[in-house]
Amino acid sequence: MKTKISRALNKYIVFLLSVIGFSLVCNQCAAQYGVPIQIQYKMNQYKMKGVVKSEKDSVIKNIRVIIRGDTIYTDTNGCFKYIYKSMSGGTVHLNFTDIDGKKNGNYLPKDTTVFIKPEQELNTDVILKKKD
Amino acid sequence: MELMKLGIKKRIALELFRQYKKNTVKLHELNYLFWECTLRCNLNCLHCGSDCRSDCLIKDMPASDFLEVIDSITPHVNPNKTMIVFSGGEPLMRKDLEQCGKALYDRGFPWGTVTNGYLLNASRLNTLLNSGMRSMTISLDGFEKSHNTLRGNNKSYEKAINAIQMLALIKDFKYDIVTCASSLNFEELDKLKNLLINIGVKEWRIFTIFPVGRAQQHKELQLTSLQFKVLFDFIAKSRRENRIKLNYGCEGFLGNYESEVRDNFFFCRAGINIGSILVDGSISACPDLRGNFIQGNIYKDNFMQVWNEKFTLYRNREWTKTGICNDCKLYKYCEGNGMHLRNENNELLFCHLKKIEQANIN
């Protein structure tokens, strides 16, 4: 109860102060060597998709794709799709690895880096080379 | 500007604010938590408050120990409204900062880090942002010569500027630049302001060197009382120009300069809203508050229990009304200045009002 009263009183004081032209004086600033307070911001959604193919243009299923520490696999059509939320875009590193040996063909791993912007679906088709 | 003679409107505002402070003290809500994640540092600053070194013998606290505390406080706070701040030393010296940040992000805590910018390249910034970092502060203490002298490294200016330029390119990211005003950079502040504006910086924070830590050995770096007053006039003027959001740091009641040189009125929230976990597990308010300001240790005590049951010297500051504070007419608005400006005998090392007053007398 006391907590509620103190909170309500403070809201009232903030209101009164803004009426007399001191609207920001109750704001909490960054402490000493601390950072500015940022408790709210917009999270953006990022979408990436692509098809993994061989040099002969055939799709490759079950290729492991590591993106931002997450692991996904290509489907029977060689497709992968990845959606994540973050505050900021930028470079994203992708690692493609054939993990089933000769079962679906035997391919060399590949690393690639892409730049992604918010609310944009990024197509990242990849061609894997066959192992000798 | 008449320093001590407050106008009627400001006096009313300060009286209202006193009541606001009393209520805030009663509420005693933790909403800003420092984690001194390392005391290692890649620079060797003349004005360092914590005397950090690259070869620091005190080991970093394991992230798991810190996260255990976070899990223990989570039921008692609103994670979304509790800012976690990585401080140091130089936080970017830790290679697991991103994992720790991601763990905080997953628990719903906003977090940020302070840095000298030396280790911040595009790839590190990217990983920090991808780990949910929401806020950052970069130190810049003047132009190349003065910054490098103060920081003890001839590449530190270049690195800091590179880091600032990267941050300026990120849309909607909250960051500020902090400058410790000293006799070395005092004459450069106006030009520094223009440089920051040209880079695209939106927020700048200036505080003044104070005689704690290594700065105690470099008395020549302290500002004269006249420089001190000119600094506040400079900040007030820059705020009126409105080309960059400039604030004086959190410390010091400033008489009539209150609300002219920063958005908020002076309120030392150490131990009232601000807590810290130091590298050895000590529980304190702001990280500079050590010795008898320490309230417990995470390796022995429950953080929330300490927060709720101790911290009395922070919540009741009547004990600060001694020495020069004893006969100060404006004590009721100040309540003994920032806690970090008190030594181990609880004596005040620095009074902002007296220093500005001194300039007026001279």
Image: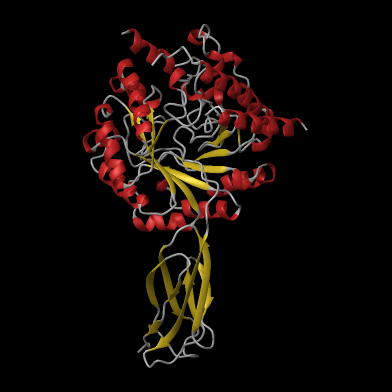
Q: Is residue A99 above or below residue B31?
A: below
x 46%, y 32%: residue: A32
For the image, the number of numbered tags is 0
**Residue B73: which quarter of the image?**
top right
Q: In this orientation, which residue lies closer to the viewer: B56 or B6?
A: B6
**Which residue is located at x 70 percent, y 30 percent?**
A6
Q: Position of residue A121 (x, y in %)?
A: 46, 73
Residue B332, above or below A130: above
Quadrant location, the N terminus of chain B = top left
Return the residue found at the far right.
Answer: A1
Percent across and percent down for residue B321 are 55, 11
Residue B334 visible in the displayed image: no
Instruction: Identify the residue shown where x is 57% and y is 30%.
Output: A19
Along the horizontal axis of the image, is B186 left or right of A58? left
Picture coordinates of residue B309 (x, y %)? 69, 29
Q: If the image is split into quadrants, where does the C terminus of chain B sit?
A: top left
- Can you see residue B230? yes
Which quadrant of the figure has residue B270?
Answer: top right
What residue sits 41% from the left and 27% below the top? Answer: B261
| Front residue (pair B191, B86) | B191
Relative to B189, residue A75 above or below: below
- Relative to B1, is B5 on the left or the right? right
Task: State the image coordinates of residue B120 (x, y, percent, origin top left).
Answer: 35, 50
Q: Is residue B72 left or right of residue B242?
A: right
Identify the residue at the far front of this view: A19
Front-lying residue, B337 or B220: B337
Q: Quadrant of residue B193?
A: top left
